[in-house]
Amino acid sequence: MKGNRLSGSELHELGIKWVYKHIKEEFKILSVNIEFEKNPQILATKDDELHFIVVKTSTYPDIGSLSSSAAEEIIQHADKHKAKILFAHVGVANADTQDENEMQHPTKGGQYYINYTGLSIQPNILQNPNS
């Protein structure tokens, strides 16, 4: 195993960079925000329309998701700016191991399997049973 485990903010940044790399030819990127609690992460235009691209990243076997309250805030923010919202859910696995448990812990300087199926118009909402 190489290095230490990725921190939450490093995992978040990895997901944003992955999405950026895959959309930069299709969209004109206006700004990228890597702050963990800020939404959207990518502000872009396409066909003269403003797009808020929300990127959420998680570790194997999960993919990134939003809380329903965060989704509601993003929807309200986009409505104010007449922006379309697109969601990017990213899952990251440690590719340096075959051990199911260790795959949940991507490491700095390691290799990764990325689960990303593109942009969607529907958020993957994490249902918190305690809320």
Image (tube, grey):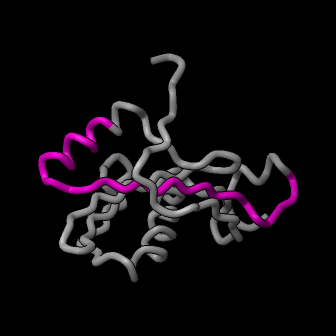
- Residue 36 lies left or right of residue 99; in this view the side is left
Q: Nearer the viewer, residue 57 or 101?
A: 57
Residue found at x 52% / y 50%: 8
Q: Confirm whether the magenta stretch covers residue 89.
A: yes
- Residue 7 lies left or right of residue 3; in this view the side is left
x, y percentage for residue 16?
Answer: 45, 64
x, y percentage for residue 45?
Answer: 24, 71
Residue found at x 54% / y 57%: 11
Q: Nearer the viewer, residue 55 or 81?
A: 81
- Residue 69 lies left or right of residue 19; in this view the side is left
Q: Confirm whether the magenta stretch covers residue 20.
A: no
Residue found at x 12% / y 47%: 80
Residue pushed farthest bottom? 25
Task: State which quarter of the image contains the N terminus.
Answer: bottom right
Residue pushed farthest left? 80
Up/down of 30 relative to 97, above or below: below
When asked about the image quadrant of residue 74, the answer is top left
Q: Nearer the viewer, residue 129 or 122?
A: 122
Labels in figure, total: 0
Residue pushed farthest front? 47
- Residue 78 lies left or right of residue 85; in this view the side is left
Residue found at x 48% / y 75%: 22
The residue segment tinted magenta is: 72-99
Task: State which quarter of the image contains the C terminus.
Answer: top left
Up/down of 43 relative to 71, above or below: below
Q: Nearer the viewer, residue 41 or 27?
A: 27
When asked about the image quadrant of residue 129, the answer is top right
Residue pushed farthest right? 98
When asked about the image quadrant of residue 33, the answer is bottom left
x, y percentage for residue 93?
Answer: 70, 58
